[in-house]
Image (cartoon, helix red, strand yellow):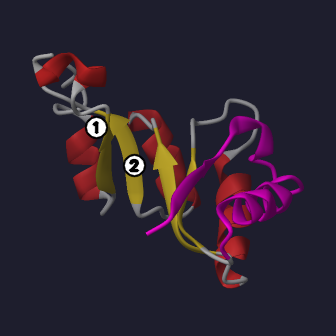
Amino acid sequence: MIATKVSGGHLGAASMPEACEQSLRNLGTDRIDLYQIHWPSRTVAIAESVAALERLREQGKIRFIGISNFGLLDIDDLVAAGHAEANQLLYSLLARTIEDEVVPTCIANDLSILCYSPLAQGLLTGK
């Protein structure tokens, strides 16, 4: 499975296709399995980004739409605009703030959770 992210500077309908093409070239593939919005944007409407991602999916360039670091309000905006398959979030034994509200919201909206930094950048390894 190949997963990568599109940065905030490329979330608009005009720039996302080229960002995706660059990712495809960099990864040496013709399709990305999970293409994720890295952070919610405060300048580009989520509806515009989701529409651009849907076009990439229709073209066969991506298989699934993902998001990363989306909290409650961001998930609500996403659900109003479309659907994503996964939300990648900071989560570990030391960073559990998503458990009370974000996890139930993801579950209620059929949004899988991918954890990043589960070992707290090595702190939980005991080394």
Amino acid carrying mark 2 in the image:
Asn
Amino acid carrying mark 1 in the image:
Val
Q: Mark 1: which secondary structure? A: helix
Q: Which residue is pictured at 68% across the width and 68% down the height?
A: 28
| Residue 38 to residue 34: above or below | above
Q: Is residue 19 magenta?
A: yes
Q: Crowdedness of circle 2 by 10 Å Cα count: few (<14), some, many (20+)?
A: many
Position of 72 with respect to 96 (left or right) is right
| Residue 121 to residue 116: above or below | above
Q: Which residue is pictured at 80% across the width and 49% down the height?
A: 12
Residue that badge 2 annotates: 87
Position of 63 with respect to 86 (left or right) is right
Location of the C terminus by quadrant is top left
Location of the N terminus by quadrant is bottom left
User: Could you say where residue 3 lies in the image, as x and y percent from the top left?
Assistant: 50, 59
Front: mark 2 or 1: 2
Q: Mark 2: which secondary structure? A: strand
User: Could you say where residue 45 lies in the image, as x and y percent from the top left?
Assistant: 71, 44
Q: Nearer the viewer, residue 5 or 1?
A: 1
Position of 75 with respect to 11 (left or right) is left
User: Could you say where residue 64 lies in the image, as x and y percent from the top left?
Assistant: 50, 70
Q: Nearer the viewer, residue 107 or 19?
A: 19
Contact, mark 2 vs mark 1 (Cβ under 8 Å) = yes
In the displayed orientation, state which residue is furthest to the front. 127
Magenta-highlighted residues: 1-29
Q: Nearer the viewer, residue 20 or 82?
A: 20
Q: Is residue 42 magenta?
A: no
Position of 55 with respect to 87 (left or right) is right
Q: Crowdedness of circle 1 by 10 Å Cα count: few (<14), some, many (20+)?
A: some
Residue that badge 1 annotates: 102
